[in-house]
Amino acid sequence: MARTTVLGRLTWRVATVAAVRDETPTARTIALDAPGWPGHLAGQHVDVRLTAPDGYSTQRSYSIASAPRGDRLELTVESLPDGEVSPYLTRVLSVGDPLELRGPIGGWFVWRPEAPEPVQLVAGGSGAVPLMAMIRSRAAGAAPFRLLYSARDPEAVLYRDELRGASQDGSGVDVTYAYTRRVPEGWPRPPGRVDAGLLAETAWAPELVPACYVCGPTGFVETVADLLVAAGHDPARIRTERFGPGGGRP
């Protein structure tokens, strides 16, 4: 099992694209075969490097979406209109292509399957990626999970079918959606952001001392973390991962 990594000790490795699948109109999951992959923990990420024929090189960080599974790992990438790396990964990269990786990286924003306490996940947009790795790493009968997923509209939700199955099979994963711009027909709540009322209605109570993981854009993460603290959750049990408009993780 992967441990906390020190970036300076990591080396680049070449993985091969084994499969690709579209998750939404703008997001794609890339399955990679990475020989010698050391394993990872749910919540860790990798650096991806692209090098042009003229030698120009650029890199971005992306969260790992898959549970540990031998030499195979998955990344889910959201294409950014002005992105330098994400358009290539989501529109050009094909099965059989090589891709340079460095990782796994990170030791704070991780979940270990042996942890017994209930888990509260709060995702904003593509912040669902590392949280999905946690759900996928969870064995049946393990600590119960709740996911509160904020998305622009139903079409922007990643892993929709898989999350529906996880929440309906009685395995202990409960999923709630908050749509900020457009809701499905007949949805019980109008469009809106995650607020104190929604958290009180859907999240684990502070008395249960859940482990909380919040991931998404910086403003979203800061707001949700403040709401959790205001509701009585222990700040030491709230772990956050944030990303900005410039691209990269998740």
Image: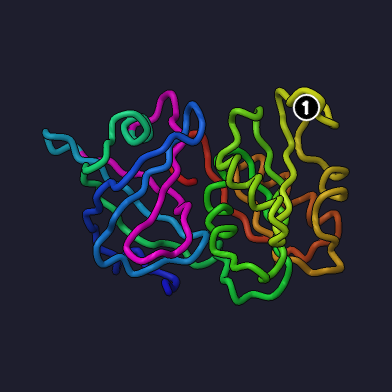
* Secondary structure state at the residue bearing disc 1: loop
Q: Residue at x 42, y 71 (%)?
A: 2
Depicted 36 relative to depicted 24: above or below? below
Q: Amino acid at mark 1?
A: Pro
Q: Could you say where residue 145 lies in the image, as x and y percent from the top left?
A: 70, 60
Foreground: 155 or 171? 171
Q: Is residue 129 left or right of residue 55?
A: right
Q: Could you say where residue 23 lies in the image, as x and y percent from the top left?
A: 49, 36
Q: Could you say where residue 195 lies in the image, as x and y percent from the top left?
A: 81, 41
Q: Is residue 95 left or right of residue 247?
A: left
Q: Could you say where residue 242 lies in the image, as x and y percent from the top left?
A: 57, 47
91 within the magenta span: no
The furthest residue to the left? 54
Q: Is residue 229 left or right of residue 23?
A: right
Depicted 5 relative to depicted 50: above or below? below
Q: Quadrant of residue 151?
A: top right
Magenta stretch in the rendered image: 57-84
Foreground: 41 or 175? 175
Q: Please state, as top left, top right, bottom left or bottom right, where the N terminus lies in the image.
A: bottom left
Q: Is residue 130 visible?
A: yes
Q: Which residue is mark 1?
A: 191
